[in-house]
Image (spheres, rainbow, N blue to C red):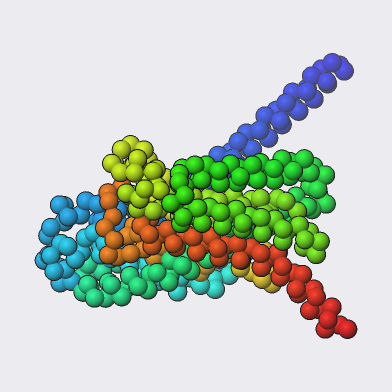
Amino acid sequence: MDVRRFSEGDMDSSASRSSGNERENAILNSKAESCCGQFRNGSNPWMARYLYALMFLVCNLLAWVSRDYGYGALKEMERLEGCHGAQDCLGTEGVLRVSLGCFTFYLLMFLSTVCTSKLQEPRNAWHSGWWSVKTVLLITLIIVPFLVPSAFIRIYGEVAHFGAGVFLLVQLVSIISFIMWLDDCCRSDKYAEKCYIQKILLAATAYVVCIGGIILMYIWYAPDTSCLLNIFFITWTLVLLQLMTSVSLHPKVNAGFLIPGLMGLYVVFICWCAIRSEPAGESCNRKAEASHSTDWLTIISFIVAMLAIVIATFSTGIDSQCFQFVKTQERAASDVPYGYGFFHFVFATGAMYFGMLFIGWNSHYPMKKWTIDVGWTSTWVKIVNEWVAVCVFIWMLVAPVVWKCRQAGGAT
C-alpha cells in the first residue's frame, strides 16, 4: 500500500514536472515567435535600430556605386534638371547627393521623434514601425537631390564638413565615456578585488601595444630623416601618450594607468589612420605605394572601412547617456529604451560624415576606386581629431578636480 502510494505520488510529481516543462517550452517558443514577429514587423524599438542601420548601409553602398561605377552606368543622368551631363551628378557630386538624401531622411526622423519619452506615444509607433512608408520616403529623398542644381550641392558639401565634425566629436565623447565607465566598474566595491589582476594586465597590454604601434609607425612611415611630417605626427603622439599618463597619475586626479592606456590605444590608432590616409606616391608612405593597384587586400580594407562607418554610427547613436550630465532616475518599464532623437541625430551627422569620407573631405581631390578617406585633407582631419581627443580626455580628468576646488573656495 505504501509502495503504491509512493508510486502514485512519484507519477503525479513527474507528470507535474513534465507539464511544467511543456509550459516553459511553450512560453519560450511564444517569446521566440514574438521576437521574430517583432523583427519582421519592426514593432520593437530595439529591433528598429538594426533596420535603420541597414538603411544607412544601403545609402553608403549607393554613394560608393555612384562614385566608382556611376560614369558608365548612369549616363542618362544628363536628362535630369540638376545635372549638366553625367559629370555633375556622379563622382564627387553623386556622393554628396546621396549623402544629402540620407541626411534629410534622418533629419526628418529626428524632428518627428525628438523628446519621445513613453512607449505609449504615437511617435514611438512611428519610430518603430511604418517601414513601408519610411522605405518609400528614403528612396524619394535620395532621388530628389539629383534634381537639385549643382550650386546647391556644393553648398551642402561645405556644410557637411561641419556636420561630419560634429559626428566625430559625438563619437569621441562616446568612446571616452565608455573608457571612463569601464574604469569605474573596475574600481567599484563589487568588482575591485575580482578585477584587480585583470585591470593590471589590461593596462600593461594597452601600453605595450601603444609603444609597439609607435615603433612600427617609425619603421613603416618614417624610413629616413626626410620624412619630417610623419616623424612629427608619430613623436607628438608619443608625447600625448606621456601627457595623458602624467595627468592621470597626478595625486589630485589619481585615475591610474588603465584609462590613459586605453585612450592611448585610440590615439595611436588615429595617428596610424591619419598617416595611412596620405596620398599614394609619397616617398614616406611605402604602404600606400604598395597598395597603389587595386587588389583583394584593398577591396577587403574598403569593405571593412565601410562596415566600420555603420557600426560606429550605430554604437554612438544608442549611447545618448554619455551626454546626460545630470543623473536621472531609473528607467521605468513604460519609458523608451534609448533616446530616439539623439539616435537619429547621430545618423544624420553620420550621413554627412560618410559623404566626406567618400570624397576625401575635398570635393576637388580625385578618388581612386575602392578607396575611402584618402588625401591630405583626410590626414589633417584625423590628426586634429587626435589632438582634440586628448584635450577632451584631459579635461574630463581635470574637470572634477576643478569643480571640487571651486566648491571648496565658495564654501570658505
Q: Could you say where residue 404 lies in the image, as x and y percent from the top left?
A: 80, 73
Which residue appears at 51% of the width and 56% of the height?
Answer: 232
The quadrant the C terminus occupies is bottom right
Q: In the image, what residue occupies the spot 26% across and 76% down?
A: 152
Quarter holding residue 208: top right
Kindly tell me whether residue 44 is visible in this rendering.
Answer: no
Q: Residue at x 29, y 41 (%)?
A: 294
Q: Quadrant of the N terminus?
A: top right
The residue drawn where x is 51% and y is 72% is: 114
Indicate the position of residue 219 as horizontal and vertical percent values.
49, 42
Nearest the eye: 29 or 364: 364
Which quadrant of the structure image shows residue 30? top right
- Front-lying residue, 56 or 168: 168
Q: Residue 45 at what x, y percent from top left?
A: 51, 58
What number of labels is visible? 0
Q: Is residue 1 visible?
A: yes
- Nearer to me, 324 or 26: 324
Q: Is residue 55 or residue 175 the one in the foreground?
A: 175
Give the percent coordinates (x, y) of residue 250.
77, 61
Q: Looking at this view, name the residue that lies furthest to the front.
A: 225
Q: Quadrant of residue 388?
A: bottom right
Q: Is residue 232 left or right of residue 348?
A: right
Q: In the visual, does 398 lie left or right of 54?
A: right
196 sits left or right of 154 in the view: right
